[in-house]
Image (cartoon, rainbow, N blue to C red):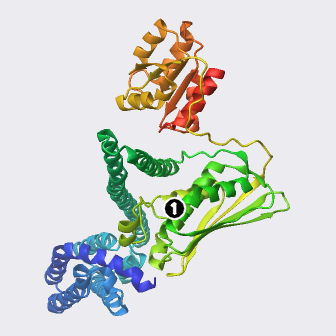
Amino acid sequence: MNWYARMAPHLALAARERLKQTPVRVTMGLLIAWVFWVGGLGHLVAPWLVISTAVQIYEYAAMEPYRRRPSAELEAPAYVLAALSGAGLFSVAFAIAIGVMWSQGDQVMAAIAVMAIAGTLVSNMVSGIGSQTLFLIGALPYFTTLFAMPVIAPDPRSPALPPLIGSVVLLVVAVTVIWSRLKSSRAQELAALAEAQNRLDQAQQAMADRAAMAAIVSHELRTPVSAILAGAHVIRQGRSPETTPETAQLIMDAGRLMTGMLNDLLDHSKIEARGMTLEVQDFDLSTFLTETGRFWAAAAEEKGLALHVATLSEALWLKGDPFRLRQIVNNLMSNAVKFTPRGGAVSLNVTTRTGADGRVDLVLEVADQGPGIPPDAMARLFTPFAQGSAQVARTYGGTGLGLTVSRDLARLMGGELTARSVAGEGAIFELAITLSPGVATIEHHETAATPTEQSRRLRILAVDDHEINRRTLALVLSPLDADLSMASDGLSALELLAMQAFDVVLMDVNMPGLDGNETTRRLRASGGLNAATPVIGFSAGSEAEQVAASRAAGMTDWLAKPLEPSRLYDALDRAVKG
């Protein structure tokens, strides 16, 4: 920004302030004419009135554009120099008139001259508060007159002359210091206003983002909810038993879609709140790639795509968070399969390099043969709730959070997620991360959703404040043929536990009133029939602190909502065997 551009905003402020001072300036000019008249200088009255009127009209005309138009339009040198010359000519004219009054030797005229200089300097401080250049242009003529006063005094040998000189210096210093403080205060005020405006803009943008989020999420959730309701209606009617497995699969797919959306929302919120934590465990990259290829094989085949997933010749054990790493890769694979048309190919490539310190530089690339990403869409690719275009949003749906969460997770791991694309030629997403070498361990895999056959009928108490959840538990536990009791709150659960022995307690953590943790603590401290009975906690919150709090309360196991039947059966099996 050049000097003229920097001056324009200050001139706009000065123009408005000088307009407010117009009545005082006109009065000052008339007062000086009156002093000339009564002081025996009548021959100067007419010239003074002409000069003072001319400089005021010129200043008004030069400043007027800055009062009517944005300062950004008035950065040309002609506008700036005209406004500055108007302010300077006004000060020069009045400073000379004040010097003439002082030189006459009349005490009254001298007093008026001093008061006039003080008043004009104060006026100049206010109008030039934002700019040192404006202040000096307006103040230098008056400072010159002040310093000339001892020289043009009627009696240079007067004993009052040294105090006068001292007073002049003191006045100049005082005016300069006051202006400097006013300028500093003004700058702080403007900075505070700018910060307040910035915070207001951020708050408004946050509200707009939340509104967009609510609109997108509500729209995207309607599709799986509609599928679940329609599928449930078909099953309840029972008119086409042969379609029941297909309908059940539809409901399961819709449920997984809803779970994925909710997980993205929760992960995004946790990352924004700096509450996301990563686990560190050993995992085999070779197994990771094999499982990824197996997971996406069916989706690729169904759409008629060729799927190429890199393999390693031998196991490569690393330390990291395989769950979050899989979440990133699955997000990228999901997009690649989604955007690649039938007959195309999707590939997952991997390169590794072991550094001198033993750490492994891992690069995972997911490439598709879709329409590619235009430059304007690339700029907002990782923006929350943003889609490549309205057409993409209508055609493919989604919340627009997958890539945002993936990049944030990559950065939490100390890596980076980048994208490159040429419109019409597909896209390549690259995840680069450095991990420490791991130690070979025995990996555990999920079991099928089939309950283990028990040697006796289990006595289970399920505690949950929501009726839908209690009915869901009853449905999932029905294959066990268990003796199932229900409680809707912690107090009711403690009453049942005091009267009847149970093999296992399923405890919702988040309940109104007496929550699951406090209920478990009271159970352990009771010394009653079920003081040592295994308690399996479950909750929608999966943060490490929440899990640790449940363990500390006395729970023996913990499951995340939504409850997966296979995990619940495994937990029951562990509880009974334990």
Around disc 1, counting alpha carbons within 10 Å, would you say few (fewer than 14), some (14 to 19), or many (20 or more)? Answer: many
Residue where numbered disc 1 is placed: 403
- Residue 324, percent from left and from top: 60, 51
Where does the image place residue 533, in percent across and percent down from the top left? 58, 15
**Which residue sits at x=63%, y=63%?**
416
Residue 145 seen by the camera:
yes
Q: Position of residue 221 (x, y in %)?
A: 36, 52
Is 110 in front, or is 561?
561
Q: Label 1 amino acid?
A: Leu
- Above or below, comparing residue 201 to residue 533 in the picture: below
Identify the residue shown where x is 66% and y is 43%.
445
Q: Residue at x 38, y 68 (%)?
A: 395
Q: Residue at x 35, y 50 (%)?
A: 227
Figure check: 341 above or below 509: below
Is residue 156 in view from this perspective? no
Give SS at disc 1. helix
Q: Is residue 539 above or below residue 382?
A: above
Residue 59 horizontal side relative to residue 31, left or right: right
